[in-house]
Amino acid sequence: MEAFYQEFGRRVREARRNANRMTQETLARRLRLSRTSITNIEKGDQGVPLHTFVQMAAILGVEPAFLLPAAALGDAPEPVPARLLGGLDKAERRFVGRVVADQ
């Protein structure tokens, strides 16, 4: 299970950095967590409740499946970089994410 949480944390960090270079502090504030909790999640030392996981994906602008390690899903979809989706609303971003995942 340790490898699962480490990979999950790596994906959270990647999505956070792709989300307009969001800081750990900003993500923590939006999730109502401490910055230390975000650090621990990204290191794979702390899990997250399901509702926090879904909220985290929404804040980061990725499908929840992207944050899950490939071992849990087969092949997880790659995220579409946030800078390419800047002019789209949330529903349009989700649509693009689904289309990319189906490729």
Image (cartoon, grey):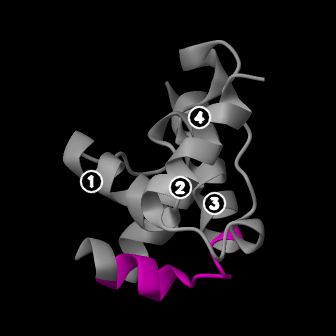
The residue under label 4 is 98
Report how far apart the C-alphas of labels 2 and 3 lie in the structure.
18 Å
Answer with left or right where residue 59 lies relative to residue 92. Answer: left
Give me the disc on residue 52: 1
Residue lying at the far top of the rendered structure: 74
Residue 96 or 60: which is nearer the viewer?
Answer: 96
Report how far apart the C-alphas of labels 1 and 4 lie in the structure.
21 Å
The residue under label 2 is 92
**Which three-letter amino acid code belongs to the residue tagged 1?**
Thr
**Image position, residue 13 (x, y; %):** 63, 62
**Which residue occupies 68% across, 66% down?**
85
- First along the sequence among labels 3 and 1: 3
Q: Quadrant of residue 26?
A: bottom left
Q: Is residue 44 above or below residue 90?
A: above
Element on which disc 4 rests = helix
Q: Residues within 10 Å of mark 3 (few under 14, many from 20)?
A: many
Instruction: Based on the picture, tell me whether residue 27 belongs to the magenta stretch.
Output: yes
Report how far apart the C-alphas of labels 3 and 1 lie in the structure.
15 Å
Q: Which of the two marks, 2 or 3, is nearer to us in this view? A: 2
The residue under label 3 is 15
Give me the disc on residue 83: none
Element on which disc 3 rests = helix
Q: Which residues are magenta?
A: 18-29
Answer with left or right where residue 35 lies relative to residue 69. Answer: left
**Image position, residue 19 (x, y; %):** 62, 72
Report how far apart the C-alphas of labels 1 and 2 lie in the structure.
23 Å
Q: Residues within 10 Å of mark 2 (few under 14, many from 20)?
A: few
**Image position, residue 14 (x, y; %):** 69, 60
Contact between marks 2 and 4 (CB within 8 A): the answer is no
Report how far apart the C-alphas of labels 2 and 4 lie in the structure.
10 Å
